[in-house]
Image (cartoon, helix red, strand yellow):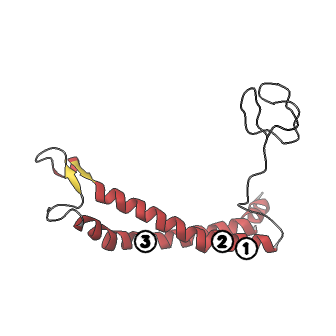
Amino acid sequence: MLKGFRNFLLRGDVIVVAVGLVVALAFSNLVKAFTDNIINPLVASAQGGVKGPGLGWQLVSGGGAGTYLNLGAFISAIIYFVIFMAVVYFVIITPYKFVMARQGKVVFGDPPPTKTCPACLSDDLNPAATKCKHCGSELSRAAS
């Protein structure tokens, strides 16, 4: 039982994913620091001379932080997400695709072609199918 677990852990794919996760988590702190210390002040300055936690509005007079609609933090979170996903794609996914292509494997490729049923409009049918697996209607050869 332990030998099977060891073999599972030492598979190449598990190692690649584990290393990618560690790198992504480490880089996450760097991107968060960038958004908190550079992007947030820039977004907050867009509101002008208003004092407060940043770009946003106080929903209830004297409500404090609990009723502050912090639009700046939301914009920063979107920027953080886009930067983080771009780094994950270009640092982890692109090299992984390259390595797998050298091994003759296609990963993250285009989805396989499908056929659409004219009766129930299911679009997940095999192109060679002659009957719809959902409603049972006959499929023409020209349907796509």
Q: Can residue 19 be seen in this view?
A: no
In the rendered image, residue 7, in percent from the top left (x then y), is placed at 78, 65
Relative side of 72 to 83, left or right: left
- Quarter of the image for residue 99 reads bottom right
Relative side of 32 to 120, left or right: left
Q: Which mark is residue 31?
A: 3
Q: Which amino acid does label 2 sit on?
A: Thr
Precedes in sequence: disc 2 or disc 3: 3
- Quarter of the image for residue 104 reads bottom right
Inter-mark Cα distance, 2 to 1 = 6 Å
In the rendered image, residue 66, in percent from the top left (x then y), is placed at 22, 48
Q: In which quarter of the image is the N terminus?
A: bottom right
Tell me the residue at 68%/69% (across/down): 15
Q: How crowded is mark 1: few (under 14 residues within 10 Å), some or many (20 or more)?
A: some
Callout 3: SS: helix
Q: Residue 94 carries which label?
A: 2
Which residue appears farthest toward the left when viewing the image? 62
Q: Mark 1 points at which residue?
A: 98
- C-beta proximity under 8 Å, tags 2 and 3: no
- Quarter of the image for residue 132 reads top right
Callout 2: SS: helix
Foreground: disc 3 or disc 1 = 1
Tell me if residue 52 comes above or below residue 97 in the rendering. Answer: above
Relative side of 131 to 100, left or right: right
Q: Count how many numbered circles sit on residues in the image.
A: 3
Residue closer to the observer: 113 or 108: 113
Foreground: disc 2 or disc 3 = 2
In the rendered image, residue 67, in percent from the top left (x then y), is placed at 21, 47
Precedes in sequence: disc 3 or disc 1: 3
Q: Which amino acid does label 3 sit on?
A: Val
